[in-house]
Image: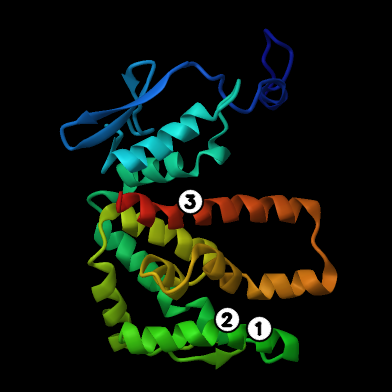
């Protein structure tokens, strides 16, 4: 649509505007409040996009998020604030909806990446076996959740008892941990890998590598273009921040 006053389309005008808002604050502090710890920008409390109070469970997490706000330059770039974005999603979308989040994680578990194996080439099969088999064995032994494996992409139904065992584990996590698990599950394609990080079986780096065996194999064969690398690094940053939540929650 043409703006009769400006003589330019909305899309064209949008291109002339910076994509990120200007930094509007100078000082970033944290403050104890009833029910949690909040982050203050020039003395005013941050609020989630839905306008709910932005309360963190402890000062360690609040300080980590405050550092993201302090690290912003002339403009605020949400891509460099993964903990803040995660806290927003928890405040606006996870609290009070924990069972729905658990259900979504279990949907991933029902078609978990680790259960779908390549038929070839041999090098890829070897990498999948090396990175994935120990976690599948751990899920069976420590989580009581044996998983069925298959070759190719045809769906294989997982045992209901295994999914219930995973549900039982997930129900022990609070809303913050569940949100972190959900992000890691979506980014890796594997609820088992996300749980392995949350429960200390793998480091975030190990889980990220395991979740990207197929992608890394393709890169080793064909290379990686710049745009794909940028997208991957953004996902990796979000994965690492979500994994960090578990340490921050322990204070």
Please rate how many residues cluster around mark 2, counting C-alpha atoms within 10 Å: few if below 14, some from 14 to 19, many from 20: some
Q: Is residue 196 left or right of residue 226?
A: left
Q: Which residue is mark 2?
A: 131
- How was this image coloured? rainbow
Question: Are dots 1 and 2 in contact, CB under 8 Å?
Answer: yes
SS for tag 2? helix
Going from N to C along the chain, the mark reached first, 1 or 3, is: 1
Which residue lies at the image location 41% right of the left edge and 79% below the top edge? 110
Which residue lies at the image location 33% right of the left edge and 16% below the top edge? 43
- The Cα atoms of the two marked residues, 3 and 2, are separated by 22 Å
Q: Which residue is mark 3?
A: 241
Q: Is residue 131 left or right of residue 174?
A: right
Q: Which residue is mark 1?
A: 127
The relative height of residue 159 versus residue 27 in the rendered view (above or below) is: below
Going from N to C along the chain, the mark reached first, 3 or 2, is: 2
SS for tag 3? helix
Question: Are dots 3 and 2 in contact, CB under 8 Å?
Answer: no
Residue 36 lies, in percent from the top left, at 22, 37
Which residue lies at the image location 81% right of the left edge and 57% below the top edge? 225
20, 199: nearer the viewer: 199
Quadrant containing the N terminus is: top right
- The Cα atoms of the two marked residues, 1 and 3, are separated by 26 Å
Residue 153 lies, in percent from the top left, at 59, 84
Residue 240 lies, in percent from the top left, at 51, 55
SS for tag 1? helix
- The Cα atoms of the two marked residues, 1 and 2, are separated by 6 Å
251, 243: nearer the viewer: 251
Q: How many marks?
A: 3
View extreme (front): residue: 251
């Amino acid at each position: 649509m043409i703006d009769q006053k400006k003589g330019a389309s909305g899309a064209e005008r949008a291109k002339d505007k910076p994509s990120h808002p200007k930094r509007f604050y100078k000082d970033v502090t944290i403050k104890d409040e009833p029910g949690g710890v909040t982050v203050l920008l020039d003395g005013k409390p941050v609020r989630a996009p839905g306008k709910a109070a932005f309360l963190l469970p402890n000062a360690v997490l609040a300080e980590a998020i405050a550092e993201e706000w302090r690290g912003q330059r002339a403009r605020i770039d949400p891509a460099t604030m993964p903990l803040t974005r995660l806290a927003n999603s928890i405040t606006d979308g996870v609290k009070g909806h924990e069972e729905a989040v658990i259900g979504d994680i279990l949907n991933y578990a029902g078609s978990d990446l680790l259960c779908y194996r390549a038929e070839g080439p041999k090098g890829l099969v070897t990498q999948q076996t090396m990175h994935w088999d120990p976690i599948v064995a751990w899920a069976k032994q420590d989580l009581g959740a044996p998983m069925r494996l298959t070759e190719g992409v045809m769906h294989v139904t997982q045992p209901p008892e295994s999914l219930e065992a995973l549900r039982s584990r997930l129900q022990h996590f609070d809303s913050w941990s569940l949100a972190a698990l959900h992000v890691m599950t979506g980014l890796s394609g594997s609820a088992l890998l996300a749980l392995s990080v949350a429960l200390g079986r793998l480091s975030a780096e190990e889980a990220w590598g395991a979740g990207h065996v197929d992608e890394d194999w393709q890169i080793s064969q064909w290379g990686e273009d710049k745009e794909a690398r940028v997208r991957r690094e953004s996902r990796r940053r979000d994965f690492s921040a979500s994994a960090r939540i578990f340490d921050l929650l322990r204070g």
